[in-house]
Every structure is written in structure tokens, then in C-alpha cells.
Image: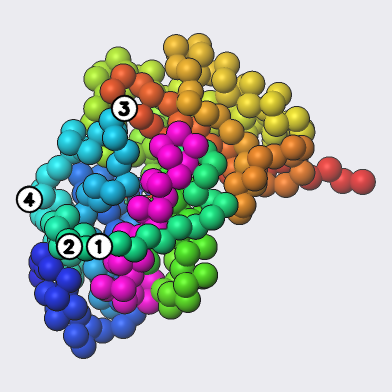
Amino acid sequence: MRVARTVAAAREALVGAAAPVGLVPTMGALHEGHMSLLRRAREECATVVMSLFVNPAQFGAGEDLAAYPRDGAGDERAAREAGVDLLFAPEAGEMYPPGFATTVSVAGLREPLEGAVRGAGHFDAVATVVAKLLNVVAPQVAYFGQKDAQQALVIERMAADLDFPARIEVCPTVREHDGLARSSRNAYLDAAERERAAAIPAALRAVAASIGGGERDPAAAAAAGLEELRRRGIEPEYLALADPRTLAPVERVSGPVLVAVAARVGRARLIDNLVAQPTTRRT
Ligand code: AMP
């Protein structure tokens, strides 16, 4: 595995790389979720590139940029074991040199849900850094997790709108035995918080069961999830039912629905989602 710390070194390492090239962007602190993306890339691509960059621009003031778990050596080892060909791990100054002035902004998808809590600038920063990574690596395929459903939609829209040739693959959420989605931020949880956090996937399942059982009123379906959370003393930042493509709020359930949740448990701010399917009634 080669390691590149600069854009020039990454480009140089990729001259003549066998196609297809697959890119897996990460912020490191690798866990089974990242590994599933790397495995998929390794199966499908001749050359696998992983980027490791904790993008300061996508953290708001008062968010966990300084505390975000970092383990460069461990991540490098894990990437090597996963069969990564090139690790691109730049410093912030390499990605944002003096004079950097450009922003990519995906209107409509940047504002709701995570955008409403973290500020729409969060997804501008995500779209901008991913655009840069796609330009540096020029992959045929780039892999993202459904765990960050809104992020995946933003990137799909950006790639389509700006004619990036990369295919965007969205991979299923990897979960712990009790359903908690794998996340680098799970490291913030103590044992008691870790146990309570299982209420988050339980809440999503409760909403999905309600919809699957025929509930068409989004507020009533959401109430089933809120109940699960409150039983474990969790008040979510949002528990929302949205259109899985546009993220528009659902007025009445009539097709697949993105059920998305964000909640603080202890120091950790956790997000999760699933796509719920209504029962199809025969007439
Ligand atoms: P991050 O390092 O948190 O920015 O995540 C890097 C990529 O891994 C993103 O595309 C995430 O959506 C994806 N990812 C994170 N957690 C999971 C998970 N539990 N299952 C699947 N993909 C994940």
C-alpha cells in the first residue's frame, strides 16, 4: 500500500492505475462500517483508494472536531489489511491552501434534517471536499454508507449535476448485535450510554413496524419511535419521516419513507436511519 500526503503524490501514485479505480472516503477511526465499504471496493475494483481526512470545514463551532477520534497508525494498518492500494491522507493545509475560495452547494438537500441542526454549511463542506477527492483520485466508483443517508443523497446529486464520471455506490448500514449503527462516535459512549443507545435503532424499527402495519399518518408512526426513545430517557433532535429521494417531509405515507433520527446520548451525537416500506394493499 502506498501512502500519499499531498494531491501531487496521490496523482503520481495513480498514473497508470488499473481500472476501475474505487474510492472510499473516510474520516478514519475505522470500524466495521468502513470495512464493509472497503471490502465492496476490493471486490469490484482493480485499484482501491481510501482517503483519510477529518474535514475541519464540515464541523460547526462547538462540534467535536478537536475530540473526534484519530488513530492514523491503526487506520493505516487496517487499510493495508483490507487490501487498499493507495491511502490518501492529507493535512488540512493541503486540502485548503491559502486563498481557497470555492464552495459546492447542493440546494434543497442541504437544508433539512442534519442541515437544520448542524447548519446547511455542513453539507456544503461535505460536497466541496468530496468534489475535491473525486477530482484528485478520478475514480470510476466511489463508495458511501447509507448510515449517512442525507450525505449520500447530497453526493449523488452533486455528482450528477457536475458530471463527475464516478458511479456513486451507497452501501448498507453495518450494525452492532443490538442494532446500533457502527460509528466512530460510538467511542464517546460509556457502558450505560452504550446500552441506552440501542433505543435509537429500536425507535427506527418501531416506526417501520407501524408503517408496515398500515399506519399512514407520519405523526402517528413517528410517535411509536418517540415512545421507544423516551422510555430510555432519550429526547431526539429530530425523528423525521421524509421522501427518500428529495427529503421532503411526508404528508401521508404512500410509498417508501426515509425514517431518520438524530439524538444525543451522553457526549455522542448519533444519527441513524432506515427506509420503511408500507404494506401494499390488494384491491
Ligand atoms: P466517516 O468516516 O464517518 O465519514 O464515514 C466514511 C464512510 O463510511 C461514509 O460514507 C459513511 O456513510 C460510511 N459509514 C459510516 N458508518 C457506517 C456504517 N455503520 N455502515 C456503513 N457505512 C458506514
Q: Are marks 2 and 1 in contact (CB under 8 Å)?
A: yes
Please name whichever residue, 130 or 270, is drawn nearer the observer in this view of the structure: 130
> Closer to the camera: disc 4 or disc 2?
2
Please name whichever residue, 277 or 56, is drawn nearer the observer in this view of the structure: 56
- Residue 166 vs 280, above or below: the answer is below
What's the distance in space between the residues labelled 2 and 1, CA to CA? 6 Å
Q: Type of residue at label 1?
A: Phe
> Closer to the camera: disc 1 or disc 3?
1
Q: Is mark 4 within 8 Å of ligand 1?
A: no
Which of the two discs, 4 and 1, labels the residue nearer the N terminus?
4
Q: Which residue is mark 4?
A: 73
What's the distance in space between the residues labelled 4 and 2, CA to CA? 25 Å
Which mark, by number, is residue 268? 3
Q: Which residue is mark 1?
A: 100
Badge 2: how crowded within 10 Å, few (<14), some, or many (20+)?
few
Which of the two discs, 1 and 3, labels the residue nearer the N terminus?
1
Q: Which residue is mark 2?
A: 97
